[in-house]
Image (cartoon, rainbow, N blue to C red):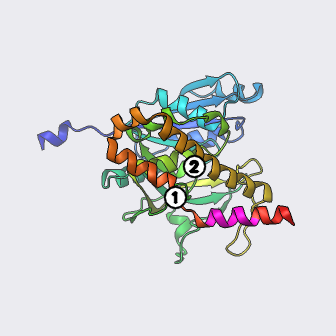
Amino acid sequence: METMSCAKEPKISIIITYFNMGKFIFDCIKSIENQSYKNYEIIIVDDGSDKENKEVLKNINHKIVTLNDNQGQLCALYEGLKQAQGEFICMVDSDDILLPNYLKTLLCAHLNSNFALISSQRGEINEHGEILSLNQNKDKINYNEIENLFKTKEYFEIKPVKAPFGLWSWNPSTSAMWRKNAIDILQYFPDKKYWKSGADKVIFSLLHLIGGSANINAVCFLYRTHNQNNFNSSSFSGNKKYLSEKTVDKLINWNIKLRIDTIKMFLNNKKELVKKYNKLNYLKMFLRVLFCIDLKICAKIIKTFAHKLI
């Protein structure tokens, strides 16, 4: 018992990448301050917001890192990581809302497993905070779900992700918590400024490659849909959401860019990465990237090029 009394709760660093989202930032921060787990820090990285949105941040009493110009989400996150003191990291979008047991649930999942990344389920709200959905991945419905939304989920399942490198298998940025020491590899990743948005595509893919990932069946946050979302789509229509052709093209380009830059990273930093992960693990990871096959993306690429040729 004496040994346990000396153990400390791990610190969690919550990094908010902020760009002209003054309309939603206070709701986001309030939801963090209302967490049942209290050993956390908030780091806001202002990614070159305009004057009006910079003024909003003056009323916030948390650590703020200011970038002089808009460098993009991945660069902003990287600057936040340099300031982070926690053993675990959450990248929270400034327009999302965390449910009260978000930190507690994700940390519990990590402490009972050995994955680099764990992602939770999401509910959705609109621009005005009205609930649109509670869990898009459920096949069973409980009429008490709205009443139970803010209560602790006593049990949840941890399901390992089994997917090739680059195949998206998680919920967006805010859904996840990850181990800080697993993302050290980001320092070697080239062309960070390309990723003005979609930083979670890079981070989650690298974490999955290095230390594996999992999903849990607990709703931990509310994803806000509005016209400034990265993947703005039409409203629900049955079980479908419809992305614009522009968005589909962006997804295809991201998948190609991610693979090319990750291969460059392994080739250009072989000495450092072999030293860090050992020669066998370096080879295994490099081959997983080099020979990953994503049939869904291949089909979209073929369809897109065929459409342009018609």
Whichever of labels 2 and 1 marks the residue nearer the N terminus, that label is 2
Within 10 Å of the Cα at label 2, are there few (<14), some (14-19), or many (20+) other Cα atoms? some
Which three-letter amino acid code belongs to the residue tagged 1?
Answer: Cys
Residue tagged 2 = 259
Indicate whether residue 175 is drawn in magenta.
no
Q: Position of residue 198 (x, y in %)?
A: 63, 46
Residue at 57% of width from left, 39% of height from top?
A: 29
Residue tagged 1 = 292
Label 2: which secondary element = helix
Q: Quadrant of residue 65?
A: top right
Please tell me whether the stretch drawn in magenta is mainly helix, strand or loop: helix
Estimate the spatial distance between the alpha carbons at disc 2 and disc 1, rounded to whole Å: 9 Å
Residue at 64% of width from left, 64% of height from top?
A: 298
Which three-letter amino acid code belongs to the residue tagged 2?
Answer: Arg
Residue at 49% of width from left, 32% of height from top?
A: 187
| Left or right of 161 on screen, residue 172 | right
Q: Nearer the viewer, residue 150 or 272?
A: 272
Q: Position of residue 217 (x, y in %)?
A: 46, 65
| Residue 73 to residue 147: above or below | above
Q: Please say if the residues under marks 2 and 1 sit with CB atoms less than 8 Å apart.
A: yes
Most distant residue in the bottom direction: 140
Q: Nearer the viewer, residue 27 or 238?
A: 238
Within 10 Å of the Cα at label 1, are there few (<14), some (14-19), or many (20+) other Cα atoms? some
Q: Nearer the viewer, residue 307 or 267?
A: 267
Q: Nearer the viewer, residue 260 or 179?
A: 260
Start and end of the magenta stretch? 296-303
Q: Position of residue 267 (x, y in %)?
A: 49, 39
Q: Position of residue 90 (x, y in %)?
A: 49, 43
